[in-house]
Image: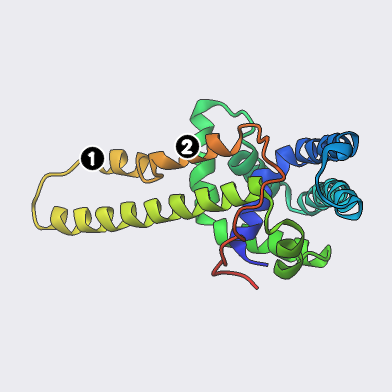
Amino acid sequence: MHHETVQVILYASPWLEAFAEAAEVAAQNKALLSFKNPKAPFDAAAEVAEELLLSHRLLELKDDVACVLQGLPDEDRALIEFRYFRKKEPAHDCDTKLRRYYRRQKEILETVRVGFVAAGWTEKLFRAYFGRFSPFLKIARALVITTRGSLRKNRLHQASDCSESAGEVFRPRRTRMATAIPAAETAQIMAMRRPVSDSVAEPPMLPTGSSGR
């Protein structure tokens, strides 16, 4: 399982139960309105079954996320909850926790990834279950945009550091560090947290990640 997929799951985890409930409601609605469905009865019944199966798989994923997080050291679990669940913290603690998380991001994501694999989740299985699930696709796209923004920001900082060593005047180091996390990330994460009503949409498959197995 790729680290990008782990991040998708973590960002979505606070809403997995709501997604499951939405899929169950969709199944009920499709069953009640099946007499209006122009498809053959078997195909109409298959659509209802798919929604129920999606609901079951989302709840299964929710339970596995809880188990994986419970198995983490207390500090790692606290950083995950702060980074992905945005648990409320005093303002003076936020910067400190973000710095601690980013210093250990790869290590923590790898630990979580191993936990998911131990619970039976692989990249292939995740794509088979949720490869066309719209909320997860939106989060994956937001992560791609945020990653590209971070890379551009890092290149600009590297160029600034080189120029600074040549005697040019730039912003104070503290200011540069405070803006290292791209502003676009906040907008993207807020978009992820809006209730999603199109859980049964059929967009393209999730993009292929680059890290993890």
Quarter placement of the N terminus: bottom right
Q: Residues within 10 Å of mark 1 (few under 14, many from 20)?
A: few
Q: Nearer the viewer, residue 117 or 163?
A: 117
Residue 4 placed where, x, y %?
A: 59, 59
Give the residue at mark 1. 172
Check the image and report above or below for 1 versus 65. Answer: below
Residue at 64% x, 59% y: name it: 5
Residue 90 placed where, x, y %?
A: 56, 26
Q: Is residue 60 left or right of residue 82?
A: right
**Is residue 19 among what the camera can see?**
yes
Quarter placement of the C terminus: bottom right
Q: Earlier in the sequence, mark 2 or mark 1?
A: 1
Give the residue at mark 2. 186
Residue 117 placed where, x, y %?
A: 77, 67
Check the image and report above or below for 44 versus 33. Answer: below
Residue at 61% x, 62% y: name it: 3
Q: How far is mark 2 from mark 1, CA to CA?
A: 23 Å
Residue 123 placed where, x, y %?
A: 70, 67
Residue at 90% x, 39% y: name it: 31
